[in-house]
Amino acid sequence: MHLLNLGILAHVDAGKTSLTERLLHTAGVTDEIGSVDRGSTRTDTLALERQRGITIKSAVVSFPLDSVTVNLIDTPGHPDFIAEVERVLGVLDGAVLVVSAVEGVQAQTRVLMRTLRRLRIPTLVFVNKIDRRGARGAWVLDEMARRLSVPLVPMGAATGLGTRAARFVPGLGPSALDVLADHDDDLLAAYVTHGISDGRLDAALAAQTRQGLVHPVWFGSAITGAGVAELVDGVERLLPPASGDPDGPLSGTVFKVERGPAGEKIAYARIFSGTLRVRDRVPLGAGRGEGEGGEGGDGRVGGDGRVRRDSREEVDGRGRGDGREGSGSRERGGDREEGHGHEEGDGREGSDGRERGDGREGSGGCEREDSRERSGGRERGDIREGSGAREGGDGREGSGGCEPGDGREEGRVTALTVFDRGGDVRREEVGAGRIARVWGLGGVRIGDALGTPGRAAGHHFAPPTLETVVVPGPGADRRALHLALTQLAEQDPLIGVRHDELRKETSVSLYGEVQKEVIEATLADEYGLDVTFRETTTLCVERPARSGAAVEFNKKDGNPFLATVGLRVDAAPPGSGVRFGLEVELGSMPYAFFKAVEDTVRETLGQGLHGWQVTDCAVTMTHSGYSPRQSHAHQGFDKSMSSTGYDFRGLTPLVLVEALRRARTVVHEPMHRFRIEAPADTLGALLPVLARLGAVPQSTGAHERAGVLEGAVPAARVHALGQRLPGLTRGEGELETVFDHYAPVTRGPLPERPRTDHNPLDRKEYLLNVTRRTGD
């Protein structure tokens, strides 16, 4: 039987969870339909979800149809939890977008459809709630065509709208041929020549739906079941089944991580190729960003992404779902090194580049340091220099040497389950096309690739634009709060936990106020921590205004580090992120030193001249140099005479902030695109209010008897605009907003963000903190 991984997406309260319950009942998986109001739905398993009646976390449930088994993924509809939706999109074969027949197209509906179209995910549309008072059929169809701007194929019509007797009458209308012919010239030619049979039309509909070119539309009600059987038929006939070779190399993607009853990590993974088996040692981690990889617990991970089969018996409870972590400990692959030949010596490394288990240096190469640093925004402990050095399970270095590796670690699968008929069942192996729950991958994170990296986990929606400080209540343990927030960040990395050791504060990034309330309730219910939050502030970014460069040379001008680093910062197009490049030869110094510079550059850019993240820039290394390894006769390696990764990690922030000073950074604030629909005679009163809020109207129009105003407004003023709108429009105004872009701050004082690092903007303070010397 074929498999189909199907997502249910919608604006909040459009009825997608109710539709999920109806689909399970229709497929015979459940005897009774769960109710959102009663908190008895199958997919809303969190106590908070049942209390609030909204979906917060994505959930997977399976049901069989005649020719396909469907893994259905119910996703949150509230925009504050859009990150959950983003992570799901990469594992879908198809989607159903639910639209309310009463409210019609809403803000999130448009965002979701644009994203589904951009990713070419085959999507069906279900217009729900036709039994509700105020339901409209043809009007909603016209509004979808106008506001979604996508080709729609009505699969029938609704009758008895607004009553419990509302029904869906199937049948393609004459408009179907027009829509399909727009994408198929042969179909149009056949129609003109000798007409089109129903079979030919159905085949064209299926082909174009599977390509994401057109979107069939059904009307119905999840509560009464109207139209659901026809939708199920469409899911089976029109959406493409999962593909993938179960005999190929393993390739999968982790889209969700949760903690089990014993605190163990459970990863939800879509397998695109190959077969995952219990006791497999699986490379993971590629694709989650620079500096975030690590080596496995026993050092057998190569750069090929191949799975290691282990035939040995599992001593600690093979295949048990008892929550015990697998063997994958988190070690970073090492700091690579580079150079430019500015220093004396030939720079040749020793024979193996490994540190001895007894702490003595080998004949050269990768040094081990027991230090803590942040890489890619996350803390790392026990950092090992040398990109290829692998730590053995007994703490001894492996035989890897200092060749550049892929920076990945491996974990050992201890248990697997797959979804089946509303529950999950234990399996010894999971093949291509399936979604599995995986135990044993202790270092796994959302977005990790399993085995050979395949589809990259891209960012399809806007990042969080709000931030707040979490304030522990009386008697709350700060360490327990730190641990709890860290675990929540495993499930949602975009909350961006940020610790300020100087002020003893912890802040999180947010999409909105509802998300803040959910975090507060989760900390109280699951961790027993009473917290409050400070006022939410807007997250800005910094962008370089021009080019700037700086360099510090080894043993010159008060440089206390045994390193030469030169960096140039150039502005890059909006949305391009951060790029790091070289104008020096890669072989001119050890690879680990280059890696140390690049990782430190990315970390330092997290806090620019005004404390905000610096983005949309290209950083180029223009100078490099190091002191080659020195040793005394019959003695070991002398760190005081030779460069280490510490020197490059210490010097790079000073050079980078000086380059940023010369480039000058401009603080940008997030801007939302807004759409206001209100009585036409109230728009005049709205304009001066919009001006005071810093909003910029860009277009006006009319829709039926209402006026439509569109433009951009600072994210910090969206809440105020929503509060003012009802009083200005006699309660009839409707506001839609969505993040659009970042724009330079032009009103009021320039926003500053407190620093949480050693403050390289103040050289003397920085050197005192880092080296206990001033460098004078």
Image: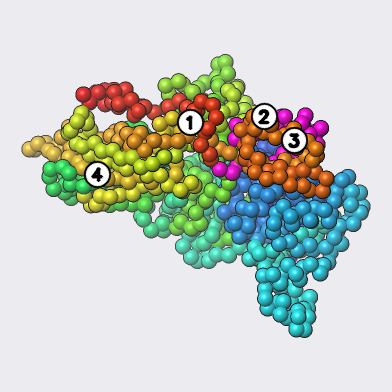
Q: Which circle's residue, 1 or 2, is located before the other in the chain?
A: 1
Where residue 558 appears, as percent x and y from the top left, is 20, 28
- Residue at 76% in and 59% down: 217
Pick out the residue farthest to the top: 474
Foreground disc of the pair 1, 2 = 2
- Quadrant occupied by the N terminus: bottom right
- Say the numbered circle drawn on residue 498: 1
Q: In the shown orientation, is residue 357 left or right of residue 44?
A: left
Where residue 639 appears, as percent x and y from the top left, is 19, 34
Name the kind of residue labelled 3 in the image: Gly
Q: In this view of the protein, which residue sits in the foreground, 386 or 121?
A: 121
Foreground disc of the pair 2, 3 = 3
- Residue at 45% in and 36% down: 666
Q: CA distance from mark 3 to mark 4?
A: 59 Å
Foreground disc of the pair 3, 1 = 3
Residues at marks 2 and 4 touching, judged by CB atoms closer than 8 Å:
no
- Say the numbered circle drawn on residue 641: none
Q: Which residue is mark 3?
A: 684
Name the kind of residue labelled 1 in the image: Arg
Q: Is residue 733 magenta?
A: yes
Is residue 710 something one can see in this rendering? Answer: yes
Q: Which residues are magenta?
A: 714-741
Q: Which circle's residue, 3 or 1, is located before the other in the chain?
A: 1
